[in-house]
Amino acid sequence: MQNKKIITMQDISCYGQCSITVALPILSAYGFETAILPSAILSTHTAGFKDFFVHDLSDDLPKIISHWKKEGIKYDVLYSGYLGDNRHFEYLLDIKKNLMNKDSLFVIDPVMGDHGKLYPAFGRDYVKHMKAILKEADIILPNLTEACFLANKEYKEEYDEAYIKDIIAGLKNVGAKTVVLTGVSYEKGKTGVVIDDGKYQYYCHDKINTSFHGTGDVYSSSFIGMYLKTNDLFYSAKCAADFVVECIKKTIGDDSHLYGVKFESLLADFVSKH
Ligand code: PXL
């Protein structure tokens, strides 16, 4: 395994098991040094908590980036998640242009929504910016809701393979290269991941009928960890899906824990097994 250095740009939700508090432990468990560029600090995530505190860091980020430039710091992988301000897209492009080593990888998880709706902080303008940056990424990791917004397609709960292929074509039309699309279900009781890097592949697994917050971040971080370790797109997409299922199974039944998944105690075993 090569010694890849990752920079991840997403928010710090202090409580709630998502974004950076999920990405750091998972990527570290895979053995990758991970630096952070926090887009904002929130007391909790925005789904299911009321009156959360938000401190926007947009004005500070250029100073952090500029210090890194002066220090000559370089990264191998750029991974973006929940952002929050349209200026953040410029910062990502700046990092891509000025702080990455040769042959670097840019992975975008276009975190914007779920279940057919955008998260409360986002509007159409944010979608427009996200759409514009897709062409810069090597891999994008949308869920079905995000893919529909980005490809400008209607969100449906029931559909066939032709519908999904049309969404993938829409994403490619706006410049996406490799697409790993999560939450694709062709059959009752099952769900899965579509992997399209020119070739369409599908990994199908059992669907657990409870949805937890932060699973997208667990998915993306484990996908990236596994992809850097194996360079195998399908295997990484599959392993990340299996890990999320294990995490959900571990969490289900604990009504005091609906805000995220209990991934911590499963992580070391999962990483060492694969
Ligand atoms: O898990 C995605 C996410 C990350 N960060 C914040 C969020 C969400 C989803 O709602 O609110 C602040």
Image (cartoon, rainbow, N blue to C red):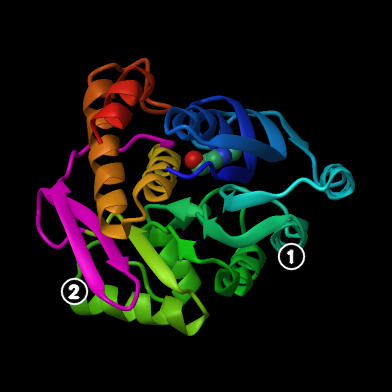
* 24 shown above or below 132: above
- Amino acid type indicated by mark 1: Lys
Residue found farthest to the bottom = 173
The residue located at (35%, 76%) in the rendering is 167
The residue located at (58%, 47%) in the rendering is 82
Name the N-terminal-most of marks 1 and 2. 1
User: Which corner quadrant of the image does residue 86 belong to?
Assistant: bottom right
Observer-nearest of 136 and 124: 136
Q: Could you tell me which secondary element the residue under label 2 belongs to?
A: helix
Q: Could you tell me which secondary element the residue under label 1 belongs to?
A: helix
Label 1 Cα crowd, 10 Å radius (few <14 / some 14-19 / many 20+):
few
Left or right position of 76 against 260: right
> Residue 159 at what x, y percent from top left?
20, 70
Chain part drawn in magenta: 185-214
- Amino acid type indicated by mark 2: Glu
Query: Residue 189 lies in magenta, yes or no?
Result: yes
**Residue 62 visible in the displayed image:** yes
The residue identified by callout 2 is 161
> Residue 180 at what x, y percent from top left?
36, 61
The residue identified by callout 1 is 97
Observer-nearest of 141 and 198: 198
**Residue 156 visible in the displayed image:** no
Asked whether disc 1 touches disc 2, contact meaning CB atoms under 8 Å apart, the reply is no
Query: Residue 223 lies in magenta, yes or no?
Result: no
Observer-nearest of 56 and 117: 56
The residue located at (35%, 34%) in the rendering is 212
Q: Quadrant of the C terminus?
A: top left
Question: What separation in Å lies between label 1 and label 2 (alpha carbons)?
Answer: 37 Å
> Residue 140 at what x, y percent from top left?
46, 62
- Circle on res. 27: none
